């Protein structure tokens, strides 16, 4: 599991102790600020983050 939150005028992804981990652009993360174009991978899914 992972959570995406908006805080301090930025978006963040936080891994919630998931079994397989959470990755941003291929790197494992516990918490990471997101930028447009980032690829979030978790549980066999890939999500592209775009800020509009």
Image (tube, helix red, strand yellow):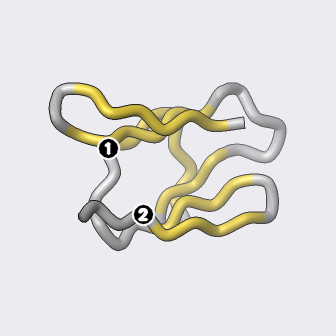
At 79% across and 54% down in the image, what residue appears? 43
At x 24%, y 64%, the residue is: 52
Residue 23 at x, y = what percent?
58, 55
The Cα atoms of the two marked residues, 1 and 2, are separated by: 11 Å
Label 1, residues with CA under 10 Å away: few <14, some 14-19, many ≥20 = some
Q: Which mark is residue 46?
A: none
Residue 21 image-quadrant placement: top right
State the SS at label 1.
Answer: strand
Q: Is residue 14 left or right of residue 12?
A: right
Q: Would residue 17 appear left or right of 13 to someone viewing this image?
A: right
Judged left or right of residue 25, residue 36 is left
* Crowd rating for badge 2 (residues with CA inside 10 Å; few <14, some 14–19, many 20+): some
Find residue 32 and report its horizontal and vertical position in percent: 39, 42
Camera-near label (1 vs 2) is 2
Image coordinates of residue 2 in percent, x first then y, are 63, 37
First in sequence, mark 1 or 2: give its number: 1
Name the quadrant of the N terminus. top right
Nearer the observer, 29 or 50: 50
Q: Residue at x 28, y 59 (%)?
A: 35
Which residue reaches farthest front? 52
Identify whether 23 is placed above or below 44: above
| In the rendered image, the vertical position of residue 2 relative to residue 36, given as above or below | above
Q: Secondary structure at mark 2?
A: loop
Residue 31, horizontal then vertical, whole percent: 45, 34
Of 33 and 10, nearer the camera is 10
| Tag 2 residue | 49
Q: Which residue is mark 1?
A: 33
Picture residue at 32% right of the left edge, 33% below the top: 6
């Amino acid at each position: 599991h992972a959570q995406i939150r908006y805080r301090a005028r930025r978006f963040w992804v936080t891994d919630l102790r998931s079994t397989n981990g959470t990755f941003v652009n291929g790197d494992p993360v516990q918490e990471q600020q997101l930028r447009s174009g980032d690829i979030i991978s978790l549980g066999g899914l890939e999500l592209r983050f775009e800020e509009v």
